[in-house]
Image (tube, rainbow, N blue to C red):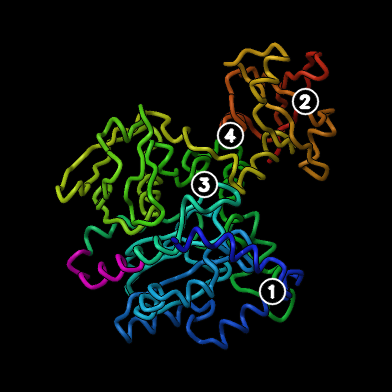
Amino acid sequence: MKMHLVLPLILLLTSSLPGQNKTREQQVREDREHVTADGFWLYNDLPAAFAQAEKTGKPILVGLRCIPCHECVKLDDHLVDTHPVIRPLLEQFVCVRVVSTNGLDLSLFQYDTDQSFAMFMLNADRTIYGRFGTRSHRTEWFGDVSLEGLAQALQAGLNLHKAYPSNKDVLAAKTGEPLEFSSSEKYPTLRDRFTDRLNYQGEVAKSCIHCHQIGDARRDFYRQQKKPIPEKLLYPYPHPKSIGLILDPDQMATVKNVTPDSSAAAAGLRAGDAIESFDGQPLVSIADVQWVLNGIDPAGASVSAVVDRGGRKLQLTLSLSDGWRQADDIAWRVSSWGLRRMTTGGLKLEPLSDERQKELNIGSRSMALRAEHVGQYGKHAVAKRAGFQKGDVIVAYDGQTDLMTPGDLLAYGARNTKPGQKVSVTLLRDGKRMTKQLTMQD
């Protein structure tokens, strides 16, 4: 039985073990003690990792991981470090565990910040071999990552390192352009609250800048300047399934299925195809596919893919049309919390069921988003103070009646409204139609 299929049982058996009720502060400090005492992973010390890699000639494996991370426990340290295939691969890397983004070099470490963990394989000269770590659901990881997939990615990273520097040119695009600020604590919304390091002399857990806070700070940076949030920030790191590619989490980038009438289907991709390179970049995991997609212009482009199909090498071309990113679901993301503050005043929305739409005489192709939750505090209580209630069904927002999903509404609001603006929202409540004014937030 594959390891990723037995993990739910392992988690069930360990869910009530002692320590589950410890405070975050206790867990962070105990994690540091445990990792430091074990000595296999360097703890939160990137300079030491680069120095050791330079000295030994080994590649570096950086594990960015929130502590405690209950959602990414699927790749629990003990399971990873003792896995009979993974452990020998890890020993060929300089392994460093990074538990916060304070001071993290954002010109080098760029990844989907709605994740709770991400891995980088790189050379001592900062050339990135590949990334690992994918997520398309708030808590469910089983369709995106597995221990088998991690083993495949590690081996691919080692193979790229062995061929280095002859492959340096094809790896250049794995490093992105600098972001708005060089490190997270320099963003305006984080500047006065955090420093470039954890505070182990005080409340260390509260001194940590979490991954999602980088994405939040980037979006806030544009919003507070009353500028539209760039589409790449609204739809970051599109999942391959948004273009019709269902990839096997146990492999590097092997097609498990192709959605009919999708960009992937039009390109001729088939189940069983092993994608060896995408836009000229060698791949080690699904995360590398996302990295390529993240860099593509929202207005669309043609992307080349080299695939191995039963031993034959084929070159295919994916054509992505204008607005292609919008097929990706953003409502599951942690970042949707901040977008709800900006655009819905704290309303958490869900699509109305088909049955309920019929009961309310709402057409099947008409907008119908039900208020699943109404925020109660601060800027997340703006909708509550404006008179919105749980159960309200929104049928028009700022004159738009075609925002069919919560993600559609969040993205529209982030692109087309500004802080302080009043937006008319039409809703149904107890069979009655009414319109309320909702103030947009920064």
From mark 2 to mark 1, how far is it between C-alphas? 40 Å
- Circle 2 packing at 10 Å, graded few (<14), some (14-19), many (20+), is many
Quadrant of the frame with the N terminus: bottom left
Q: Secondary structure at mark 3?
A: loop
Which residue is disc 3 drawn over?
A: 136
Q: Is residue 289 left or right of residue 183?
A: left
Q: Which mark is residue 407?
A: 4
Q: Which mark is residue 392?
A: 2
Which residue is disc 1 drawn over?
A: 27
340 within the magenta span: no
The reply to whether dot 4 and dot 1 touch (C-beta < 8 Å) is: no
- Front residue of 399/348: it is 348
Tell me where residue 149 appears, x and y as whole percent.
39, 60
Q: Secondary structure at mark 1?
A: helix
Is 62 rendered above or below residue 309? below
Determine the main secondary structure of the stretch shown in magenta: helix
